[in-house]
Amino acid sequence: MAPRSSVTTRWWALAIIVLSQGAQTGATEVPEFRFGFSGGTLSKVDLRDAQAALEFWLNRVSQTMDVGLQPVVRAYADDGLLSEAVEGGGLDAIAMTALELV
């Protein structure tokens, strides 16, 4: 049988390893899904309301399907800013009208 101090040291080492693994697992960030849409895609709707509704809906879809993504929605009143965000790699998906695309 090992001396008491040796067993205690092993238990403390095991506890530290388990706790550090739990801390690393809990600290992992959920990847973002960045969705942008132009104001032209929705008519007669406040863009802030649409942005909040889309973010809520995408969160529900992500949770229901267990996708593991954190949706971030941004509304663009100016299609030029939306195009810049796309070209700069700041968005994963977009919604815009065909006329805004050209």
Image (tube, rainbow, N blue to C red):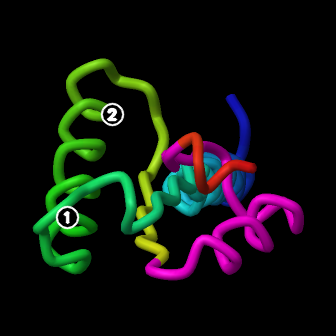
Nearest to the observer: residue 5 or residue 19? 19
What residue sits 28% from the left and 57% below the top?
A: 55
Residue bounds of the magenta highlight? 77-97
Three-letter residue code for mark 1:
Ala
- Crowding near pointer 1: few (<14 within 10 Å), some, many (20+)? some
Looking at the image, is 99 positioned above or below residue 75? above
Label 1, label 2: how far apart the Cα atoms are: 18 Å
Horizontal and vertical percent position of residue 4? 62, 52
**Front disc: 1 or 2:** 1
* Left or right of 59, for residue 25: right
Determine which of the numbered discs, if any, sits on residue 50 in the image. Answer: 1
Horizontal and vertical percent position of residue 63? 26, 33
Horizontal and vertical percent position of residue 52? 19, 68
Determine which of the numbered discs, if any, sits on residue 62 in the image. Answer: 2
- Crowding near pointer 2: few (<14 within 10 Å), some, many (20+)? some
Residue 86 included in the magenta stretch of the image: yes
Nearest to the observer: residue 21 or residue 76? 76
Which of the 4 image quadrants contains residue 89?
bottom right
Residue that sits furthest to the top in the current view: 65
